[in-house]
């Protein structure tokens, strides 16, 4: 039988939404889920900080949301299918959100995708990024 | 008896749905995607299936983190398009088939696949985009749909082997339903893509091509691919391709490939689509 493992932790620029992250990010993600309702979106936009106080999140998680620090949200247990609902509340498409997480402009990111995306070469293992000192783009 | 005569796989990229809904389907960027489905639209119109068994994943629309079913079978009479944050998609309500779905649920459970029975479930782009890709934009969908929502959001999703064997059990369940019905099974999601973090935009054309080949000719071997290989080689969201093995398990071992289409990109994703048909059955 396959054992639960962490062999995926050596994939660069990738956070697998496993049990530990799901537990850590439960309220962050449930906050995002609440934005599925129009009245909640309005309440959040009217006073973000007060709205967030309904959810027992850590101060770091709240700050990451207020800062719209998308990668930090994922580090703190956020899942992309949930954080994208915050993106939608801000009027961001999935591609705009993805661009922000890669540090590219939307145009640079769209161009990379139009040219076949980020290639597997140099992007499979963390050591490949560490050797380069930067992420390998298209 | 009911019979599964064919199966297909397709990506279910939400941006395709947005392009269709917003009248942008004729733009070159989207036309390049949608043209790849034209032969399949004709094929399925000629085949006239009665029922589509549609394997997909919910994207935090019907299921949050409160309850995370690994396999959830939609047994309701209808499924409304979900509000995914910008209002429900303007697509027809999906008509279910409660009598058949309940039969399949009972058969699967007694066959030792302990699926979750769902009587209330809105369906998101994971289900409605494949419906558009195969059936266009009709007033009413021309088939009844039995949805199977598979968890691929919370790690770990079910193994490829489990999915493949579930497909076999679904076939047994369908074939023991005492109505003369033609069923097509859809496996959706994929192909390579990563939506999150600094590696977003990851695409692996070689992996995808090999995956399609093995899906046709070596499904048993493919069903043993470990999750970490999907994550590393197909991107963190590419792992949803395990769902394609449910479709494949429900077909004969030896199938005819009717149509194949592959295109990069649709938004963040490699689009992959393949249509497989069981060989003409000998008279039963």
Image (cartoon, coloured by chain):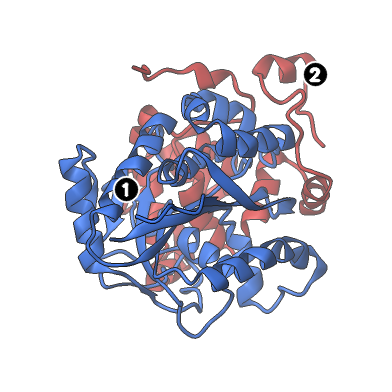
Chain colours: A red, B blue
Residue B176 visible in the picture = yes
**Residue name at image x 63 percent, y 62 percent:** B15
Vertical placement of B262 versus B147: above or below? Answer: above
Q: How many marks?
A: 2
**Residue name at image x 18 percent, y 44 percent:** B109
**Residue name at image x 60 percent, y 76 percent:** B21
Report the Cα–Cα distance between label 2 and label 1: 48 Å
On the image, numbered disc 1 is attached to which residue? B170
Task: Report x, y in % for residue B53.
Answer: 39, 58
Chain ID, mark 2: A
Task: Report x, y in % for residue A23.
Answer: 33, 34
In what element is the residue under mark 2? helix
Task: Report x, y in % for residue B151.
Answer: 38, 44
Q: Nearer the viewer, mark 2 or mark 1?
A: 1
Q: Residues within 10 Å of mark 1 (few under 14, many from 20)?
A: many
On the image, numbered disc 2 is attached to which residue? A132
Q: Are marks 2 and 1 on the same chain?
A: no
Q: Are marks 2 and 1 in contact (CB under 8 Å)?
A: no
């Amino acid at each position: 039988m396959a054992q639960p493992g962490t062999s995926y932790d050596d994939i660069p620029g990738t956070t697998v939404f496993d049990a530990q992250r799901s537990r850590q990010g439960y309220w962050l993600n449930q906050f995002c889920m609440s934005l599925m309702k129009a009245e909640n979106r309005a309440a959040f936009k009217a006073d973000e900080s007060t709205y967030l106080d309904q959810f027992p999140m850590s101060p770091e998680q709240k700050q990451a949301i207020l800062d719209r620090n998308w990668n930090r949200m994922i580090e703190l247990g956020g899942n992309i299918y949930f954080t994208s609902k915050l993106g939608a509340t801000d009027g961001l498409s999935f591609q705009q959100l993805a661009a922000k997480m890669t540090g590219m402009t939307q145009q640079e990111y769209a161009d990379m995708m139009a040219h076949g995306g980020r290639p597997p070469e140099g992007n499979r293992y963390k050591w490949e990024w560490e050797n380069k000192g930067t992420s390998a783009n298209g | 008896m009911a019979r599964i005569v064919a199966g297909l796989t397709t990506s279910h990229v939400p941006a395709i749905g947005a392009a269709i809904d917003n009248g942008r389907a004729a733009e070159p960027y989207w036309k390049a995607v949608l043209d790849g489905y034209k032969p399949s639209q004709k094929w399925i119109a000629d085949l006239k299936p009665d029922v589509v068994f549609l394997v997909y994943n919910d994207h935090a629309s019907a299921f949050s983190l409160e309850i995370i079913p690994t396999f959830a079978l939609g047994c309701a009479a209808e499924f409304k398009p979900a509000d995914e944050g910008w209002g429900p998609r303007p697509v027809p309500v999906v008509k279910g088939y409660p009598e058949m779905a309940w039969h399949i649920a009972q058969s699967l459970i007694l066959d030792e696949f302990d699926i979750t029975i769902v009587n209330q479930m809105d369906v998101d782009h994971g289900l409605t985009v494949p419906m558009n890709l195969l059936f266009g934009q009709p007033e009413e969908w021309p088939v009844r749909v039995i949805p199977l929502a598979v968890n691929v959001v919370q790690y770990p999703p079910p193994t490829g082997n489990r999915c493949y064997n579930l497909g076999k059990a679904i076939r047994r369940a369908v074939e023991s339903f005492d109505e003369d019905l033609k069923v097509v099974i859809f496996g959706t999601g994929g192909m390579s893509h990563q939506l999150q973090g600094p590696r977003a935009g990851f695409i692996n054309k070689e992996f995808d091509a090999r995956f399609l080949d093995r899906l046709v000719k070596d499904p048993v071997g493919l069903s043993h691919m470990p999750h970490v290989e999907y994550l590393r080689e197909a991107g963190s969201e590419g792992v949803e391709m395990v769902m394609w093995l449910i479709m494949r398990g429900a077909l004969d071992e030896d199938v005819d490939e009717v149509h194949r289409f592959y295109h990069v990109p649709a938004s963040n994703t490699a689009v992959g689509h393949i249509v497989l048909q069981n060989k003409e059955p000998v008279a039963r």
